[in-house]
Amino acid sequence: MLNPENCKIAESEDQKLRLMVLVDTEEEFDWSQPHSRNNTGVTAMRTQEKAHRIFERYSIVPIYVCDYPIVSQDEGVRPLQELYKDNLCEIGAHLHPWVNPPYDEVVNNFNSYPGNLPAPLEREKLRILTETIAERFGKRPKVYKARRYGAGANTTASLEALNYESDTSVLPWTDLSSQDGPNFSHCESRPYWFGSSKNMCEIPMTIDFAGLLGSSRKGLYDLLDSAIGRAIHLPGIFARTSLMDRITLTPEGITWQEHRLLTKAMLARGCKSFSFTYHSPSLAPGNTPYVRSPSDLEIFLDRFERFFDFFFGDLGGIPATPNEIRSSLIPA
């Protein structure tokens, strides 16, 4: 999954623009504090209808990639079961190791990335999560996203063994190795095929560069994001001067104007598939750094509508599920 030599960029069979909406569906916890097995609250799930009222207007069928505290507790899973029964959403898997049995590892930053765990433990945690989702929804998940984008050397083998078809863990152009995470600095934002038979589809998080120098993103951003570059604040300087701005397609801390800049820049590079992502607790003020108050929530949801109006209206794009994106790609 992480080796570009073993991957093949997937081209679309048509010229349609497709947007997937993916929700990291997880328990509430203080992101500034160390991980704890005791953080399993899922009260924010009762607020998910705030986004669904918007999704239904645009015929969007989002995918909720769910972790163990969500699917193992009635309060977490019931709102999704109702949506799933009415074909208003899809369900995937999202592995938070520290709150997913078996609890055999030490809880620390290194082990919070699933791909850092010993291969048998990563696979067993994912097996239990997969089977719990299957029990709750009557169907095994086919789409996976590692918590903290923590795909590792053994993740692909585990996904293949459990019959997954798509992964959404890759954070393009980003090196997390200084934080004990994976290095995705060589990965693009376009989908690609990977796995032993090249039949698994990676749908990366939509993150790329806008600005006058955006097309020079790979070599130049390595310089900007170096220790020296960060020390003299080069990434911020280049963003403020519209030379190069690294943007993620999320309503969490990113404005609708930035969403448009990013999308236009990626379209100019031939990208056809996009992923709009956020965390489920953000819909209940106070749970994430992005939504602290009711007024923050209004701004947050306004970004949904402004971007959807732009993507489906101005650009003529269509909503798509992960399987629909996978099916639209020319096989490897």
Image (spheres, rainbow, N blue to C red):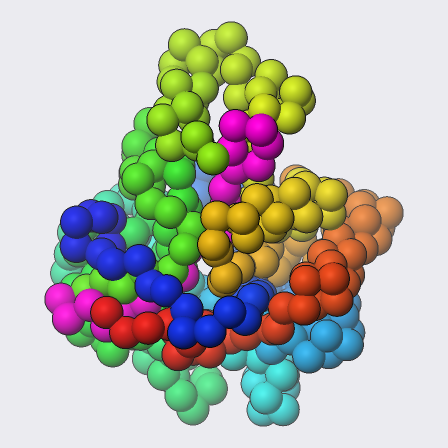
Which residue is at 43% across, 30% downward?
216
Q: Please determine whether, in this image, residue 64 is positioned above or below residue 238.
A: below
Vertical order, 179 against 15 (above or below): above
Q: Quadrant of the C terminus?
A: bottom left
Q: Position of residue 156 (x, y in %)?
A: 21, 61
Q: Residue at x 34, y 37 (%)?
A: 185
- Residue 154's quadrant in the figure? bottom left
Closer to us: 134 or 16: 16
Q: Nearer the viewer, residue 100 or 88?
A: 88
Horizontal relation, residue 7 to residue 177: left or right:
left
Can you tell which quarter of the image residue 254 is in? top right
Is the N terminus in the top left, top right, bottom left or bottom right quadrant? bottom left
Going by the image, does 190 lie left or right of 123?
Answer: right
Image spot of residue 43 (x, y percent) = 65, 64
Q: Residue at x 58, y 29 (%)?
A: 212
Q: Position of residue 260 (x, y in %)?
A: 68, 48
* Observer able to see residue 52: no
Q: Which residues are magenta?
A: 196-214
Q: Nearer the viewer, residue 22 or 135?
A: 22
Q: Is residue 292 visible?
A: yes
Task: Answer whether residue 70 is magenta in the image.
Answer: no
Q: Residue at x 38, y 47 (%)?
A: 188
Q: Position of residue 175 (x, y in %)?
A: 35, 34
Q: Is residue 82 above or below residue 236?
A: below
Outermost residue to the right: 295
